[in-house]
Amino acid sequence: MSATGLPFDDIRALFASMPQASEVCVEDARERDAILVKPAGALGRLEEIVLHLAAWQGRSLPVVQRPLVAIFAANHGVVAQGVSAFPQAVTRAMLETFAAGGAAINQICATYDIGLKVFDLALDIPTADITQEAALDEKACAATFAFGMEAIAGGTDLLCLGEMGIGNTTIAAAIYHALYGGTAADWVGRGTGVDDAGLARKISAVERAVALHRDHLADPLEVLRRLGGREIAAMAGAIMAARIERVPVILDGYVVCAAAAILHAIDPTSIDHCLAGHLSSEGAHAQVLKRLGKVPLLDLGLRLGEGSGAALAVGLIKAAVACHTDMATFSQAQVPERAN
């Protein structure tokens, strides 16, 4: 608890307790990589992934034995502005599909042996319409952030974040417009597939929302509560909890990165433990990743959400760890090392 007891001050206090990367473990991993039976640098980004995991797990030999996809689902009052091609009831229907094992993310998790948790964030009570008022009050926003921190309570060594929520690409675009400026059109994409008229409504909604709250947007936490949604707040909490517990995070696409952007705006080092799973075709995700300093592991033209891109990246990450851990060394394989 912070000295003031104010909800957002409790969140700000967490930034002071963030552990840093383990340089010792990184050096140990580099030394092992140097004796593996391959030319130096031959595995490219796979080698970088291993060093990243070593740094943030604090393990010279990183592991991916309990990866988890955590999907946070919420509904948004801004849907009343006609910003989505689908009704809000789809959010609930998709949660039921996740539970029944019928969604894309279920198949990806089964393929790569990834755990899956889905969090219903008061779907029957949408946040307020951000074009009319703040999405959440400070207490509710902070409580949802704290709820998100519990996502890793069961234990994991690699956290993949996902989301579900009709209207949340509008919410993400509003956050980016508030944080990064430009015009609303710079950040708004077609989301679930809106037509030109729907795209115009989305742009208008983002413009009006940011204009309404403009006097309060210098504070990233105010951006979160005024323009965000429950899933954004919860994912921000999950990212912070993972940092504190030394769990690397794989970010999914356009909406998930809005949660990372809030933390990054407070302290750019707060998402150093995160990797970008993929480049989404939604909105201006490439520009977002550039601002966050992240290079995506995959570029498959995905815009599904659900944590799908992050989960697909787990296969790549598992391969990287397996190579580092189980590949023979030059001496074990009796292969001559490089001549001096």
Image (cartoon, rainbow, N blue to C red):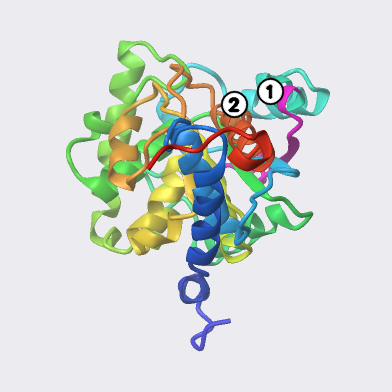
Residue at numbered disc 1: 108
Q: Position of residue 59 (x, y in %)?
A: 63, 58
Circle 2 — which element? helix
Q: Please indicate, yes or no, whether residue 74 appears anywhere in the rendered image.
A: no
Residue type pointed to by label 2:
Leu
Q: Please indicate, yes or no, whether residue 34 appears anywhere in the rendered image.
A: yes
- What is the residue that sits farthest to the right in this orientation? 100
Question: Does residue 158 belong to the magenta stretch?
Answer: no
- What is the residue that sits farthest to the top in this orientation? 195
| Quarter occupied by residue 99 | top right
Q: Which residues are magenta?
A: 111-128
Residue type pointed to by label 1:
Ile
- Name which of mark 2 and mark 1 comes first in the sequence: 1
Compared with 257, 244 (above or below) is below
**Is 231 in front, or is 245?**
245
**Is 226 in front, or is 48?**
48
Q: Position of residue 165 (x, y in %)?
A: 56, 33
Residue 312 image label:
2
Q: Residue at 73% x, 34% y: name it.
A: 114
